[in-house]
């Protein structure tokens, strides 16, 4: 099965690829009490997808991806609270652009490095932006964040409701659109080229590819998508706080991606679903120890399922075919 | 007289106090079949890396078709038509053979930034990749992953990728290194059939290949050109015999 842009494969959408969307619709009708968790999961899928694009496909390792979620989230919050711009789509576009611009600017500096240096720089940038978010309280509300974010009803009709129905549908639709675009991207010559960089960077240089420029492009796109996730988070929770800028969030999203399977578009779907449902269940059962359970899960995955949950599924399927 | 395909003037490379290339003056004529030989550690691969831009030269000039490319990035040199193969196979091991070739052609054709249509819909790229694989006798293996090929065939994939870039100058860094002699015959055939308009510089240890393939030979010893000449001159040169051809014992 081809999971990446390839000149030898095909790019048709398989039947299995309808599963996430069927599940998303089923949840809406069957689990009406879980729509706010559902919306959060959609947001994290979006966020994880953006990480997958740079880590899974282009091989850029980062521990600072939360910075782009945070910039998108704060952009939406500031637009609403400080500037009284409450149009949901305007917030979405502005937040995504802000984040993409920051991705371009920071990427231009850090993508000249690689490996551990790159990792440290992503950490450093996240730390700096966190501190700016903390200190620039005239703009960001500092440690209190920005409560009371308002979002106009969609198309003047659909308001965010108490049960989170509108929010859920909104998140599913945005995710669907982004998924479609990312899928095109991954199967395109651009996606194939990114895979080439991940697999063998020196070889790509020798093929005449300006690797740095290519990485910068994908980094910017990824930042823009992470920004969208940030905007959704602010809109759905109607507030934004410093927590979106923490290392913890950057670590969480990395764990989710590894859990689901790095370098596969649906790894970014499976990871957040499993992680957040596990977190939700464990937090109810053992409010003080839930992260212990998540840790055990992660250890299991990295030891026994190197390709994540989807890698494990593949292995089992392959064993079924060749007894 | 037209400019040579590739020329170096007083090319030097130092790693700290260690000199691995000293004042190399070298000319590769258009359409040439030129071999670069020398004992281990003579600086042959370093020289090739400087030519392609993988390694910056300490001083000196590199001219490509008369144009100074000394300061140019590797990718820009490739775009101008300077292709290479690697001594140690450097392929996309987990990708299909076809894609290994197609990625290079996509770069050459400038489609690598296309983000919407599926890569598989670029039929011309697929067809051209396939044509190169057929030339190499690899058509049947096009959809296998490179790492599932025997080593000799991986070396052929290296050459197919380089040809896909439509180079004017091709640098072959030990194309038959590590290949068992049963398979190296195939590589020799491929080398003999390479398009005549490509100027080729081959680095090779196997003297059979060198003397069958090359019309000119440059001998590199300790980072400096010892002698350059036609194969028979080199074979009869006493200095070459002393340092290289095994009269004094081969390492």
Image: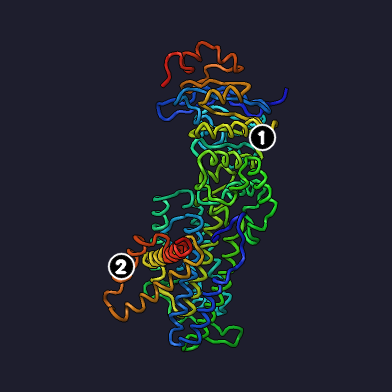
Chain ID at mark 2? A
Chain ID at mark 1? B
Q: Which residue is more in the foreground, A175 or B238?
A: B238
Task: Name the side, left or right, on which A132 lies relative to B117.
Answer: left
Q: Which residue is more in the foreground, A137 or A320?
A: A320
Which numbered marker is on residue B13?
Answer: none
Where is residue B93? Give x, y as percent: 50, 48
Task: Name the side, left or right, on which A194 lies relative to B166.
Answer: left
Q: Is residue B26 visible?
A: yes
Label 2: which residue?
A296
Task: Name the side, left or right, on which A197 lies relative to B113.
Answer: left
Front tag of 2 and 1: 2
| Secondary structure category for the residue under label 2 | helix
Q: Residue at x 67, y 55 (%)?
A: B122
Give neighbour class at mark 2: few <14, some 14-19, many 20+ (Cα, 10 Å): few
Are labels 2 and 1 on one chain?
A: no
Give neighbour class at mark 1: few <14, some 14-19, many 20+ (Cα, 10 Å): many
Task: Name the side, left or right, on which B27 lies relative to A75.
Answer: right
Instruction: Quarter of the image for the C terminus of chain A: give it.
Output: bottom left
Q: Disc count in the image?
A: 2
Q: CA distance from mark 2 to mark 1?
A: 57 Å
Q: Residue at x 56, y 65 (%)?
A: A182
Instruction: Quarter of the image for the N terminus of chain A: give it.
Output: bottom right
| Secondary structure category for the residue under label 1 | loop
Residue B160 lies, with reference to residue A304, above or below; the image says above
Where is residue A57? Give x, y as percent: 51, 57
Where is residue B213? Give x, y as percent: 61, 25
Where is residue A264? Give x, y as percent: 50, 62
Residue B146 lies, with reference to residue B55, above or below; the image says below
Q: Mark 2 and 1 residues: CB-CB less than 8 Å, in contact?
A: no
Which numbered marker is on residue B168?
Answer: 1
Residue B94 lies, with reference to residue B32, above or below; the image says below
């Amino acid at each position: 099965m081809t999971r990446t842009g390839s000149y030898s494969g095909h790019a048709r959408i398989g039947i299995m690829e309808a599963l996430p969307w069927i599940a998303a619709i089923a949840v809406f009708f069957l689990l009406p009490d879980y729509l706010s968790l559902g919306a959060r999961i959609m947001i994290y899928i979006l966020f994880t997808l953006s990480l997958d694009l740079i880590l899974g496909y282009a091989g850029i390792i980062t521990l600072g991806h939360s910075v782009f979620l945070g910039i998108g989230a704060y952009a939406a919050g500031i637009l609403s609270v400080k500037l009284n711009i409450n149009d949901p789509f305007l917030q979405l576009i502005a937040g995504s652009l802000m984040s993409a611009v920051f991705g371009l600017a920071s990427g231009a500096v850090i993508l000249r490095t690689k490996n551990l240096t790159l990792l440290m720089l992503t950490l450093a940038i996240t730390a700096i932006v966190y501190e700016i978010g903390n200190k620039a309280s005239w703009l960001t509300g500092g440690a209190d964040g920005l409560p009371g974010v308002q979002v106009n009803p969609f198309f003047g009709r659909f308001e965010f409701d108490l049960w989170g129905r509108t929010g859920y549908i909104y998140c599913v639709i945005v995710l669907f659109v982004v998924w479609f675009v990312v899928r095109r991207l991954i199967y395109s010559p651009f996606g194939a080229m990114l895979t080439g960089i991940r697999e063998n960077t020196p070889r790509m240089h020798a093929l005449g590819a300006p690797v740095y420029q290519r990485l910068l492009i994908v980094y910017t796109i990824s930042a823009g998508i992470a920004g969208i996730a940030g905007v959704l988070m602010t809109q759905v929770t109607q507030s934004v706080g410093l927590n979106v800028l923490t290392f913890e969030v950057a670590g969480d999203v990395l764990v989710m991606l590894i859990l689901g399977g790095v370098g596969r578009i649906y790894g970014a779907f499976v990871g957040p679903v499993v992680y957040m449902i596990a977190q939700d269940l464990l937090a109810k059962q053992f409010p003080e120890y839930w992260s212990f359970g998540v840790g055990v899960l992660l250890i299991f995955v990295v030891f026994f399922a190197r390709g994540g949950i989807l890698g494990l599924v593949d292995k089992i399927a392959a064993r079924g075919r060749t007894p | 007289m037209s400019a040579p395909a590739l020329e170096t003037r007083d090319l030097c490379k130092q790693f700290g106090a260690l000199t691995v290339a000293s004042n190399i003056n070298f000319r590769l004529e258009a359409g040439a079949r030129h071999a670069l030989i020398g004992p281990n550690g003579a600086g042959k691969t370093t020289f090739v890396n400087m030519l392609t831009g993988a390694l910056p030269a300490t001083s000196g000039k590199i001219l490509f078709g008369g144009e100074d490319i000394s300061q140019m990035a590797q990718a820009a040199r490739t775009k101008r038509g300077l292709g290479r193969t690697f001594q140690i196979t450097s392929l996309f091991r987990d990708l299909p053979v076809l894609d290994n070739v197609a990625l290079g052609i996509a770069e050459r054709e400038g489609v690598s930034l296309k983000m919407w249509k599926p890569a598989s819909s670029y039929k011309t790229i697929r067809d051209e990749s396939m044509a190169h694989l057929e030339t190499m006798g690899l058509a049947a293996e096009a959809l296998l992953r490179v790492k599932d090929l025997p080593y000799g065939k991986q070396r052929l994939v290296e050459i197919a990728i380089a040809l896909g870039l439509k180079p004017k100058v091709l640098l072959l860094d030990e194309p038959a290194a590590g290949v068992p002699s049963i398979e190296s015959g195939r590589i020799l055939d491929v080398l003999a059939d390479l398009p005549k308009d490509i100027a080729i510089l081959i680095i090779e240890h196997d003297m059979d290949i060198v003397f069958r393939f090359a019309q000119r030979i440059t001998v590199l010893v300790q980072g400096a050109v010892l002698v350059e000449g036609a194969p028979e001159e080199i074979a009869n040169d006493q200095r070459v015999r002393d340092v290289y051809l095994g009269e004094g014992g081969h390492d």
